[in-house]
Image (spheres, grey):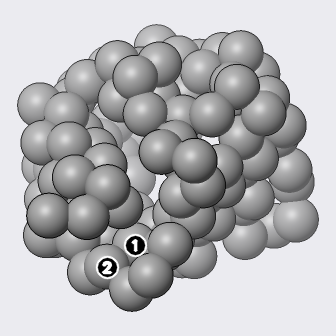
Amino acid sequence: MTVVKQIAQTLVQLCRAWQFPEAQATLFHENAVNLEPDGRTTTGLPAIMAKEQAFLDSISERHLLEISDPVVADDYFAIQLLMDVTVNGVGRRMRNELCIYKVRDGKIISEQFFY
């Protein structure tokens, strides 16, 4: 099994268990970059983890989380994430997104979301 496939499978396993911060702490490079569809960019693992924790803290109820098995090609992998949550002050939100990851030197160096 390639390193990229191992990382992809570990990420999926942790995220399916709602362990998003643990996945980031374990698998992401210190200088990783997060790219959102609206153009926002977050750089560096501490900033990415803080952003993720703020999102998780805003969730008042979890209704659904489905994460596909990863598709791996060279240094990249992709997953589909379907999430239905109730967010404080916003209400119930359904998000269906494609998540693309790039791996370099055994760590995730970038993640980009499309939704």
On the image, which quarter does residue 20 sit in?
top left
Looking at the figure, which quarter contains the N terminus? bottom left
Q: Residue at x 54, y 58 (%)?
A: 103
Relative horizontal placement of residue 17, taking residue 74 as reference (left or right) = left
The amino acid type found where label 1 is placed reads Phe
Residue 37 versus residue 110 in the image, above or below? below
Q: Which residue is mark 1?
A: 77
Relative horizontal placement of residue 30, taking residue 27 as reference (left or right) = right
Q: Which mark is residue 16?
A: none
Can residue 67 be seen from the camera position used here? no
On the image, which quarter does residue 43 sit in?
top right
Q: Position of residue 7 (x, y in %)?
A: 31, 49
CA gap between label 2 and label 1 equals 4 Å
Q: Residues within 10 Å of mark 1 (few under 14, many from 20)?
A: many
Q: Residue at x 50, y 72 (%)?
A: 75
Residue 73 versus residue 62 in the image, above or below? below
Q: Position of residue 81 (x, y in %)?
A: 30, 63
The amino acid type found where label 2 is placed reads Val
Marks 2/1 in contact by CB < 8 Å: the verdict is yes
Q: Which residue is mark 2?
A: 72
Q: Earlier in the sequence, mark 2 or mark 1?
A: 2
Residue 93 versus residue 115 in the image, above or below? above
